[in-house]
């Protein structure tokens, strides 16, 4: 269409009350060169919002400009017409690829597998008792202390500052490792390393904030693959440098420091997202963003009874965290959610106790001054590879988890108990290597299953809260056991005696799981337990009743008009999260 010249731009060119759709179409279809001129031309026709009719309102357009549209309709920003979805998608994938590369580089620490032999070498000259009872226990204490603050700061600061803090902490760890000479220096090393462990929570949510929810599953695979590839490559590189290249432990740690400085520089160039899961849930932009599940929890001002509360009490009840805790209490009525959360707490505690002290056990079983005879890197690489394979294989296991979950957990835990007993009793280093590889592989086999079983019944925010609480409880239990068993202020046991205690720990867990599994199977055989369909294994009581109603009224569904409301309430079509008070009080059937 032809645009008027500068001399023709006057309010008389169109009627005072011209069709608003035509003016909006002219405004959106203008050329870039005469955009400001068109705005000045249309400006006299714009009236104050108070003078508009009841069906009109102002909405934001590009660059702070307004256009009148009927209320109830949504107008997308004109910038989407200029930028196009293709350019935005390419930008998202570029940022996600850069973050995956950052995750790979961060894991490139070839000297990490050889830290314990390095501390025991003549270069550092620490004793096994100092490492076991004075240095390593600090990791559990400091991790418990920094976990919650970093978890909150991660969301409040929108991920990037925490990743930068992680990079600075890694650099501090290796500087203390290379320059430290006292036990106090090594204890500070453990403190900074605990910060890096707690800051790992920022990586996955950050990469999810860069892409739309439809790409979450693919990006989860990419990010997980980049991290595992980094760990595997780091272990293989470290072993090759030590065994083939003849590099000593000091130079190997300098190489690790170089990789970590490079990863810190990459973290400085990461883009800081504009939103996060809890504290920065900004209002969704029309046509661009997507709402959060927490926004559906009691939206709006609420019923009159809630408005009668005092301002402080109402603000407390409407707090996002308080609402989520109430919903979490309702969600915990699901038996499978309770089972896998307990597994996460107790088995993760045992897993990290074993991995923290495994390298010390290897140094005790096979102490040698020849660095080429130390194969810690190769064992870590094999354990990472087996863990990746078992995690991948877990995705293809299709059984009735509501019935067989306790039995599977009990069998796996019993096998882990046998492996820990082997570690505590053998003097063959190769059996120790094999036992650690299998132990880690069995644990990683159940991790994706537990993740799916927990996440499939919760909304995104509740899922993050559940995993955070489970990790915190596991850390507290880990700290208590460490204080009693490992710390010199407690029993101060040797590493072999500690592994014997850990064997008893896993043995008790396996007996408890197997006993619960046999009890469930006995009830099932006696007809006291009704098995559920796979789609109902993690359903809430309301979903079960609604499904029964659907099965009864299946013949009447075709007679419903297209405009008829669904039989299942709208707020229950989402993952278990936003639940009403009445729904939370319904009894839960045990699986």
Image (cartoon, grey):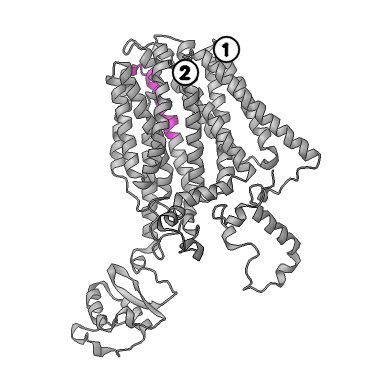
Residue 323 % position (x, y):
49, 52
Does residue 448 belong to the magenta stretch? no
Q: In the image, which residues are magenta?
A: 229-249
Residue 183 % position (x, y):
33, 16
Residue 107 appears anywhere in the view: no
Horizontal side of 463 relative to 64 (left or right) equals right
Q: Which residue is mark 1?
A: 425
What secondary structure predominates along the stretch shown in magenta? helix
Residue 278 appears anywhere in the view: yes
The circle drawn on residue 119 is none
| Crowd around label 2: few <14 · some 14–19 · many ≥20 (10 Å) | many
- Secondary element type, mark 2: loop
Horizontal side of 475 relative to 408 (left or right) equals left
Horizontal side of 145 relative to 408 (left or right) equals left
Look at 54% across and 47% down and name the residue there: 328
Horizontal side of 402 relative to 81 (left or right) equals right
Residue 104 % position (x, y):
39, 36
In this picture, is 504 found above or below 364?
Answer: below
Q: Identify which residue, 13 or 539, lies in the foreground.
A: 539
Q: Which residue is mark 2?
A: 486
- Secondary element type, mark 1: helix
Q: Quadrant of residue 40?
A: bottom left
């Amino acid at each position: 269409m032809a645009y008027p010249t500068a001399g023709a731009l006057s309010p008389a060119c169109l009627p005072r009350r011209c069709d608003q759709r035509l003016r909006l179409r002219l405004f959106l279809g203008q050329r870039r060169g005469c955009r400001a001129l068109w705005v000045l031309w249309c400006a006299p026709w714009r009236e104050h919002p108070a003078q508009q009719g009841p069906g009109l309102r102002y909405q934001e357009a590009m660059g702070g400009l307004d256009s009148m549209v009927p209320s109830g309709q949504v107008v997308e920003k004109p910038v989407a017409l200029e930028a196009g979805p293709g350019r935005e998608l390419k930008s998202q994938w570029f940022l996600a690829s850069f973050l995956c590369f950052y995750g790979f580089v961060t894991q490139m620490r070839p000297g990490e597998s050889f830290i314990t032999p390095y501390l025991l070498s003549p270069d550092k000259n620490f004793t096994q008792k100092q490492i076991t009872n004075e240095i390593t226990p600090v990791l559990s204490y400091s991790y418990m202390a920094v976990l919650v603050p970093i978890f909150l700061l991660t969301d409040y600061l929108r991920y990037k500052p925490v990743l930068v803090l992680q990079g600075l902490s890694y650099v501090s760890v290796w500087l203390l490792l290379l320059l430290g000479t006292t036990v106090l220096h090594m204890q500070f090393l453990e403190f900074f390393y605990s910060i890096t462990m707690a800051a790992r929570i920022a990586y996955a949510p950050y990469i999810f904030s860069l892409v739309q929810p439809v790409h979450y599953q693919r990006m989860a695979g990419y990010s997980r693959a980049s991290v595992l590839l980094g760990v595997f490559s780091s272990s293989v590189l470290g072993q090759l440098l030590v065994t083939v290249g003849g590099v000593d432990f000091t130079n190997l740690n300098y190489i690790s420091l170089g990789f970590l400085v490079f990863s810190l520089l990459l973290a400085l160039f990461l883009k800081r997202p504009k939103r996060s899961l809890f504290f920065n849930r900004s209002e969704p932009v029309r046509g661009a963003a997507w709402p959060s599940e927490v926004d559906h929890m009691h939206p709006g001002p609420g019923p009159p009874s809630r408005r009668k509360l005092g301002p402080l009490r109402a603000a407390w009840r409407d707090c996002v965290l308080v609402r989520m805790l109430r919903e979490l209490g309702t969600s915990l009525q699901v038996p499978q959610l309770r089972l896998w959360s307990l597994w996460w707490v107790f088995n993760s505690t045992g897993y990290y106790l074993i991995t923290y002290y495994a390298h010390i056990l290897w140094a005790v079983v096979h102490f040698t001054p020849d660095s080429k005879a130390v194969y810690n890197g190769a064992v870590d690489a094999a354990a990472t590879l087996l863990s990746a394979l078992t995690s991948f294989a877990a995705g293809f296991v299709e059984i009735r988890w509501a019935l067989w979950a306790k039995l599977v957990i009990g069998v796996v835990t019993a096998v882990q108990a046998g492996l820990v007993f082997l570690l505590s009793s053998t003097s063959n280093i190769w059996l120790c290597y094999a036992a650690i590889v299998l132990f880690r592989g069995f644990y990683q086999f159940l991790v994706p299953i537990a993740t799916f079983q927990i996440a499939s019944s919760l909304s995104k925010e509740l899922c993050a809260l559940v995993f955070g609480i489970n990790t915190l409880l596991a850390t507290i239990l880990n700290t208590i056991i460490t204080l009693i068993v490992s710390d010199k202020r407690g029993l101060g046991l040797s590493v072999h005696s500690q592994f014997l205690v850990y064997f008893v720990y896993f043995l008790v867990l396996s007996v408890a799981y197997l006993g619960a599994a046999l009890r469930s199977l006995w009830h099932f055989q006696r007809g006291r337990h009704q098995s559920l369909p796979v789609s109902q294994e993690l359903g809430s009581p309301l979903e079960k009743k609604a499904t029964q109603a659907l099965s009864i009224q299946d013949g009447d569904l075709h007679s419903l008009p297209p405009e008829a409301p669904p039989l299942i309430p709208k707020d229950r079509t989402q993952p278990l999260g936003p639940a009403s008070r009445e729904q939370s009080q319904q009894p839960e059937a045990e699986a």
